Image (spheres, rainbow, N blue to C red):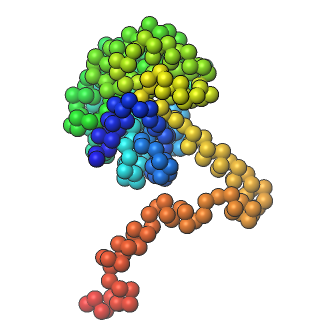
């Protein structure tokens, strides 16, 4: 089944499903092997892995390069964190073209202004786009896609900007009418009150995706009861890798040795397995002449 069709099943299924963050080809492969049905290509995580801020400092072509490796390494669908679409409607629709060329299943764009600011930064104002402008961007993206199953998710930042439930509902409905295939409702509260209020009023009129990074203590069963279609675990692979690398690097520096660190890291054999080295070995046996034959023999 096409990756786009796989993801379409996730957001249309009445059963709650889960999408796990990845930020490069290796982490994407690990997500697939862990059993997840979909991957969230996090803008925060990709930016951090490149050593830059989550403020569109990584260009959209640089992000595409990362996505191509992620897509090549996996067979499950990838939903891309497309920030604001990297500009106006024209940038956004060109981004869709390039995503489809790389077999990406869908893109999520947020109704902020370019360049975006991460939703969890408290020291910056969160300025939102006009509803009409953002709706036009959604329409342009849907008109551009070639695969009917390609998914465009509209991320509503009204709660993040402190604009309340009425604004969140107004924006979500406008984006649904503009053609968005699902709504991602975002909140930075530590409780689920904003999401709960939205879901009660929304009444399952369109698929809803949530990102419980801040309200992580909410039991998953509550998401099911509210009718959420998909949950994104948005950044834990990035954060886990940072923690592990910091500990190992500090340990090796302090010891001036890798002897103690060796037991706490993956083996080289595991690295080679994840790189699919065996496939290359088999291909060499199939396509290369026997090693005993010399250049002279080939003449």
Residue 10 in view here: yes
In percent of width and height, residue 179 lies at: 27, 22
**Residue 119 versus residue 58: which sits nearer the camera?**
119
Q: Residue 258: image x %, image y %?
A: 71, 63
**Residue sitting at 45 percent across and 67 percent down?**
277
- The picture quadrant where one finds residue 154 is top left
Task: From this view, report whether residue 234 is shown above or below residue 25.
Answer: above
Residue ID at (37%, 43%): 77
Q: Is residue 41 or residue 182 the one in the foreground? A: 182
Which residue of the protein is positioned furthest toward the bottom in this rendering? 297
Residue 91 shows in the view: no
Q: Nearer the viewer, residue 250 or 186?
A: 186
> Going 53% across and 20% down the picture, which residue do you hit?
187
Front residue of this view, candidates 241 and 115: 241
Tell me which residue sits at (62%, 28%) in the image. 217
Quarter of the image containing the C terminus? bottom left
């Amino acid at each position: 089944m096409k990756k786009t069709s796989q993801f379409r099943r996730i957001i249309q299924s009445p059963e709650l499903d889960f999408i796990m963050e990845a930020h490069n080809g290796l982490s994407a492969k690990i997500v697939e092997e862990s059993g997840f049905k979909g991957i969230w290509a996090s803008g925060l995580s990709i930016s951090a892995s490149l050593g830059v801020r989550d403020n569109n400092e990584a260009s959209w072509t640089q992000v595409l390069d990362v996505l191509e490796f992620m897509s090549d390494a996996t067979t499950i669908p990838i939903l891309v964190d497309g920030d604001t679409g990297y500009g106006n409607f024209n940038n956004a629709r060109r981004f869709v073209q390039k995503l489809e060329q790389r077999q990406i299943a869908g893109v999520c764009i947020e109704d902020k202004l370019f360049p975006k600011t991460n939703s969890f930064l408290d020291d910056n104002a969160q300025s939102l786009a006009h509803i009409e402008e953002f709706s036009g961007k959604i329409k342009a993206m849907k008109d551009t896609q070639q695969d009917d199953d390609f998914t465009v998710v509209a991320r509503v930042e009204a709660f993040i900007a402190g604009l309340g439930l009425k604004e969140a509902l107004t924006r979500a409905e406008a984006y649904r009418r503009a053609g968005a295939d699902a709504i991602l409702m975002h909140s930075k509260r530590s409780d689920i009150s904003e999401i709960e209020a939205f879901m009660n009023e929304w009444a399952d009129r369109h698929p809803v995706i949530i990102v419980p990074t801040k309200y992580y203590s909410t039991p998953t069963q509550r998401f099911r009861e509210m009718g959420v279609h998909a949950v994104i675990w948005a950044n834990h692979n990035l954060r886990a890798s940072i923690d592990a690398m910091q500990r190992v690097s500090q340990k090796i520096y302090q010891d001036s040795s890798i002897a103690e660190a060796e037991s706490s890291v993956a083996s080289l054999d595991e690295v080679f397995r994840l790189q699919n080295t065996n496939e290359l070995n088999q291909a060499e046996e199939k396509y290369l002449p026997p090693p005993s034959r010399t250049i002279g023999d080939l003449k």
